[in-house]
Image: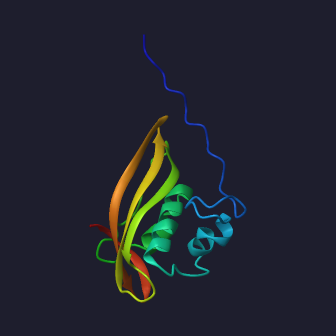
Amino acid sequence: MSRRTRPHAPRPAVTAASPCPCGLDAAYGDCCGSLHAGERAAATAERLMRSRYSAFAVRDAAYLLRTWHSSARPDGLDFDPVMEWTRLEILGTTDGTAFHQEGTVEFRAHYTAGGRADFQHENSRFVREGGQWVYVGEV
């Protein structure tokens, strides 16, 4: 007997009024949405990390590529259609403020894929490039 998996139900669209996926107590449009739209830049490495997580959640490849360091930026991104990002935990930061040129953010990004919950744990490095915070890669 073969076992069929249920098709992935479409997730509700994130709107400007939706809670921001990054976990801060703000609407998406006032939080990460304004960063994604280019209305402002992330002031800290942690804010960039949160906005990049939200970009994965809303599948904003252009923002992710724009905020990737030029030496590490891939040519493009493909999103797994069954993956849904569900929660971000910031575990720690070093430097990464307006007074620094680099910093790290340790995080745990929770997701479901094919009905199974899991998470990605990473300590990410961020630097300033052209005056803006960008993601370099895992430390």
Q: Quadrant of residue 68?
A: bottom left
In the picture, which quadrant includes the C terminus? bottom left
Residue 105: tell me if it is visible: yes
Which residue extends farthest left? 139
Residue nearer the viewer, 55 or 101 = 101
In front here: 7 or 128?
Answer: 128
Residue 103 picture quarter: bottom left
Residue 62 in sight here: no
Picture coordinates of residue 87, whole percent (x, y): 52, 52
Q: Is residue 50 left or right of residue 68?
A: right
In the image, residue 139 above or below residue 58: below
Instruction: Give whichever of 7, 55 is nearer the camera.
Output: 55
**Residue visible at 45% across and 18% down?**
3
Q: Position of residue 115 (x, y in %)?
A: 49, 34
Residue 118 falls in image quadrant: top left
Residue at x 47%, y 57% (from the top left corner): 89
Q: Residue at x 35, y 54 (%)?
A: 121
The image shows residue 96 at horizontal and vertical percentages of 40, 79
In the displayed orientation, state which residue is furthest to the top: 1
Residue 10 is situated, as x and y percent measured from the top left of the image, at 61, 42
Which corner quadrant holds the N terminus? top left
Vertical order, 138 against 86 (above or below): below
Which residue is depicted at the point 44% across and 82% down?
97
